[in-house]
Image: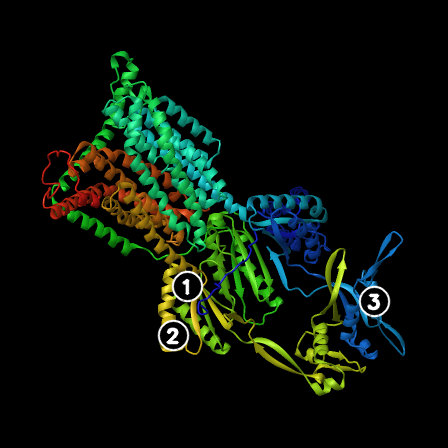
Amino acid sequence: DAKRPVISTSNASDRPIAWFILSAKRPSSEQVEEMAKMYPELRDELDKINAASNQGLAMLRLRKLAQDHPEVSSLLPPPDLDVTKLRRFAEDEIEAAFERVSGVSQSNVIGGLEDELQVVVDPEALAARNLTIDDVRRVLRAQNEDVSAGDFWETKRRWVVRTMGQFRSPAQVEQQLLTVSAGGPVYVRDVAEVRFGFKKPDGLVRRFGESSIAVNALRQTGANVLDVMDGLKAVAEELNRDTLTPRGLVLTQVYDETEYIYSSVNLVQQNIFIGGALTMAVLMLFLHLSVRTLIAIPLILASAVAAAYVSPWFFVVTLALIIIVGFWFARGALVVGLAIPISVIGTFLILQMLGRSLNVISLAGLAFAVGMLVDNAVVVLENIYRRYDTLHERPFVAAVKGTQEVWGAILSSTLTTIAVFLPIVFVQEEAGQLFRDIALAISGAVGLSMLVSMTVIPTAASRLFHSGNGDSDRDGKPNPNGKPLPTGEQHQGWLRRFSDRCSQLILAPILYFARAFVRIVTSLNDWLQRGIIRRIALVVVMTGMAVWGSYELFPKVEYLPPGNRNLVFGILLPPPGYNLDKLMELGEVVESELRPYWDIDPDDPKAQDKDFPAIGDFFFVARGRSVFVGLRAQDPLKAGRLVPLIFKVGQKLPGTIAVGKQSSLFEQGLTAGRTVDIEISGPDLNRLVALGGRIFGQVLQILPPDQGTQARPVPSLDLSSPEVHIRPKLMQAAQMGVSTADLGYSVNALIDGAYASDYYLGGDKIDLTITGQMDFSKDIQTLRALPIATPVGQLIPLEALADIEMSSGPEQVNHRERQRAITIEVSPPPNIPLETAMQLIQEEIISPLRQSGELNGGYRIVLAGTADKLRKTWESIQFNVLLALLITYLLMAALFESWLYPLVVIFSVPLGAVGGVLGLTLLNYWLQFSTGDPTIVQTLDVLTMLGFVILIGTVVNNPILIVDQALILIREEGRTPRDAIVESVRTRIRPIFMTTVTTVLGLLPLVMFPGAGSELYRGLGSVVLGGLLVSTLFTLLLVPTMFTLMMDAKAMMVWFLWGGGKRSSQSDDRDETPREIPPVEAALN
């Protein structure tokens, strides 16, 4: 179908993983100290140079001091060391060395002056010999070439013939013959001077006020960024040691992408340590409640925190404490805890087999799963112990039957947890890659934990209980009921009796509260199930409130989180026509405005009192039509607060648009990230500019800049970029023998220097250019008098051969689908979600324009960029959430062999949804309270949306346990549905709370602890945490009520269809004798 597009918009670009700055080397601390001894009165100032936090700041302070005190000038680099003239050196030594590093695809040198071989012509000498600049170009291009001339054989040798003409020295260029006239031969040296020089600079780099050269490195696709960075650092160290230091130079790394990666991975590892320790603490409390447990748990948690924040060696201490305590008096918890290392290590193997790398997202998935890994093991161990302790079965029999009794519920809960990821894995948008990483990590870990609970836990439990009934504390058996077992005090010493008395006093309130809670929940369920009206009211109120709350409180959505990289950049867009000198002036103004924030020591109390964080690194690049500013904060966690500083400084530059952004974690490019791109396309450029200007103004009205909105047009809406049009006078030019091409080349050579050929200098290719003896580009009058040598031997001013007109035009013209296009890039404030900004722009700007007919005539406006990605991803996620619900229902229907019982379980999902929304809301209050920064907001980005998908598979686990146990009691013991469901809640409330608390505490560090990378997963964690808590509390009432209602409805339908049977399962509490199930009832099941 030709009407359907077959190509979608695609942007591909590489982002440097490292930036280095080449600059003059600062004096060593020993040199500064020697100078301080010579001039004691300058010690304070010299100490500031030594205390400078970086190379650039030290050199800046030294130059300031040398201006006032010339006696310290000996510490400065030699006067003949001009870093800007070392571009070719940087390309030969640094760029080439970086490109030899394995995994580096490309390295680029930015800034400095580019070498060229210049042929400086004299127009008068050319005209006197009837030559033109174009004649010089033709000769140089024709002679500067080595030509292969074939080969021939002589006896046994093969001779290769080459015609050698390539220039190998400036003298050889000067000796080239241009023509032979009546006066004799004319050589290049007769009309020009050949010398080495530098091209007109197209960009300059300054760092802390020092002229510098920047070098970056790009990574090959698929290469490991950590390995590549290690190679780059090793090469940089070698260059500094062997090549640069002897020349008085130093190469400083100013940006390292792996810093954020290492910080993020370390934070996740810390959270795993603490989450695992909290999980083990909960297991010990539930399974081995005693005074010794209460004493041991703080020691374990303190050691885990020390492992996270003091030294990784404390991890060994934590592990040793867990093993010692486990073998001593908490073997049940130790057995259950085996699920964590086995599942985590197994997940590493699964990821390796699938070819996935271990990244922050997959590690966060493992951290989420830590608390979930023991869920299945807890259910199995608790059920085994119940049969062992209550039914007095032998350990082996209890292990086998206890596992068989719950294996169906465990399989159902595990498969539902895994199955919800199936639709998400097939999301085609960019976010799908992140979804796959976290889905594989959680699915692999939870799946392995199920296998562990079915195999390792029963085996270990049969050995754990082998010694028979006895004291939990003595024999290491778990005590799920929390009541003290017989202790045999008559055989114990007074110290043991005193300890037991203390235990009873301390534990009695805890045990009383736990038993009271179980009695209250059981009694409330028994009361609810005795009345049809109260049950219906409960279901309607709970479900209705959950659905209404989820709809009303559901926040607007965002795209991918920007991350918190310690790199903030600003783009200054001046009015059209600014030259490089003016751009440098703008950069120097910015440098001066930002100086109070970087010309200060980080430990200085004044740095803490400023409105914005201290700047750890600062540089700017003037290039092309803009100024690029780069900042890094002294405190990496405060980098985002520098964005308003750039915007504030930009407002002080008249006519300049300033855009400040923090480097995006997932997007690439200087303007990528959290933006709404308003793309306007149409046939007429002038109308497009007018339309773009109107939309640009309306955007700033509905999203005011004083709230943090940043907007800029691409390209500029100003069509007045100054231009000079040279229109040849064809008759006069023909009389002088000058063609339009000759005239254009001559003007180019005399103004800017025109490319003629290539010249190889030491293996490097540089340009061979033709240029004029003087600067003819000072002003328009000089341009009019530009001397043009003609073939007829006359030197004619340019205005005699052409009309020179002043004009203007656009700096750049973009096209979209073969039509001219202008894009308004809008970055809304952090407190306004991207979806809200899109709706405002659509409703306040685009819709009125369409309704008014102003877009008729082939003009279009679309929202593109990140906004378009968000729209597609959000639509995909909505569909896949519904598909995950359907898969969960069908899976439970297959496992329960019924279409009715899964409906009971599904009713817990709305409770999880409203809990997830509340969890995200509370997280924002916590972030603003803990950081004191009201601008820090955790939005509902697409990674956070994944939390609601995970909830579908996790909140159904507890209802599955309740329903499955009730069905077992009905089928095996013949109980009525009401008695069965009440007993099921009573027996399952303990494992439900154990699994919920372990999961919640395993998630808690990920949500609560700030740091690099935490913005990626804390929103997801808060959704899962809040959803689990709310659903667990209310599921204990909603699921039993729904179960009895379903059973009543089924019984009534059977009675209605068959004319017999019991109208309601609640009408008679007596035991029923087993009966044959009618076919219709079997079909309902």
User: Residue 506's mark?
Assistant: none
Residue at the top extreme of this rendering: 491
Res 682 visible:
yes
Residue visible at 46% across and 66% down in the picture: 5
Instruction: Classify 694 as above or below 765.
Output: below
Say what amino acid the circle numbered 1 marks.
Asp
Please identify the quarter of the rendering in which residue 267 is found. top left
Sort mark 1 into few (<14), some (14-19) or many (20+) by Cα contacts within 10 Å: few
Q: Secondary structure at mark 3?
A: helix
* Disc 1: which residue: 706
User: Which residue is nearer to you in this view: 115 or 208?
Assistant: 115
Say what amino acid the circle numbered 2 marks.
Leu
* Disc 3: which residue: 174
The quarter of the rendered structure image containing the N terminus is bottom left
The quarter of the rendered structure image containing the C terminus is top left
CA separation in Å, label 3 and label 2? 66 Å
Sort mark 2 into few (<14), some (14-19) or many (20+) by Cα contacts within 10 Å: some
User: Residue 849's mark?
Assistant: 2
Instruction: Classify 886 as above or below 347.
Output: below
User: Which residue is nearer to you in this view: 446 or 999?
Assistant: 446
Mark nearest the camera among 2 and 1 is 2
The first of marks 3 and 2 along the sequence is 3
